[in-house]
Image: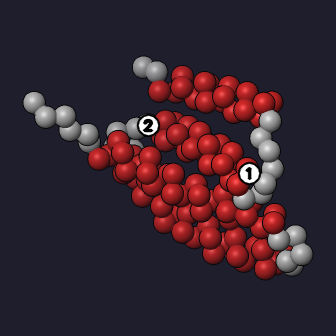
Amino acid sequence: MPFAINPAYVWPVLLLLASNIFMTFAWYGHLKFTSSPLYIVIVASWGIAFFEYWLAVPANRIGHSVYSAAQLKTMQEVITLSIFVIFSVFWLKEPVGWHQMIGFALIALGASFIFKG
């Protein structure tokens, strides 16, 4: 019997990963450009967030056939934190200390309970 993976389990994860990259840049990318006027930053962030929605909405629509809404939201939050750690180090050049890593790990541990039972 061949091993088959239901795409409805995989596509939401992939789409949420891509979505959160856009979301993180929309929300925090402008922090490197503090001399830009706020209205420019807001408009640019809206433009980036537009693509985030194009990925997040289908992720949730497809994923809801196999995941609960609570599981989808939890998945999104853990993905957000994971993407943010990478973004913070490589884009903002801000170190992530052990306090943050322990806090994020505890959030991920708590999130794992959503997927039990």
Which secondary structure lies at badge 2? loop
Is 98 left or right of 114, judged from the image as shown? Answer: right
Image: 4 above or below 50? above
> Which image quadrant: the N terminus?
top left
Query: What is the x, y in percent for residue 87?
Result: 68, 53
Which secondary structure lies at badge 1? helix
Q: What amino acid is found at the position of numbered circle 1 in the picture? A: Ser
User: Which residue does the image show at 36% across and 45% down from the upper left?
Assistant: 10
Q: Answer whether labels 2 and 1 touch (C-beta < 8 Å).
A: no
> Which image quadrant: the C terminus?
top left
The residue identified by callout 1 is 88
The one nearer the camera, 32 or 42, is: 32
The one nearer the camera, 47 or 1, is: 1
Q: Circle 1: is it few (<14), some (14-19), or many (20+) Cα within 10 Å?
A: some
The residue identified by callout 2 is 68
User: Which residue does the image show at 69% across and 33% down from the upper left?
Assistant: 104
Q: What amino acid is found at the position of numbered circle 2 in the picture? A: Ser
Res 42 → quadrant: bottom right
Residue that sits furthest to the top in the current view: 117
> Which badge, 2 or 1, comes first in the chain's sequence?
2
Q: Can residue 57 be seen at all in this image of the molecule?
A: no
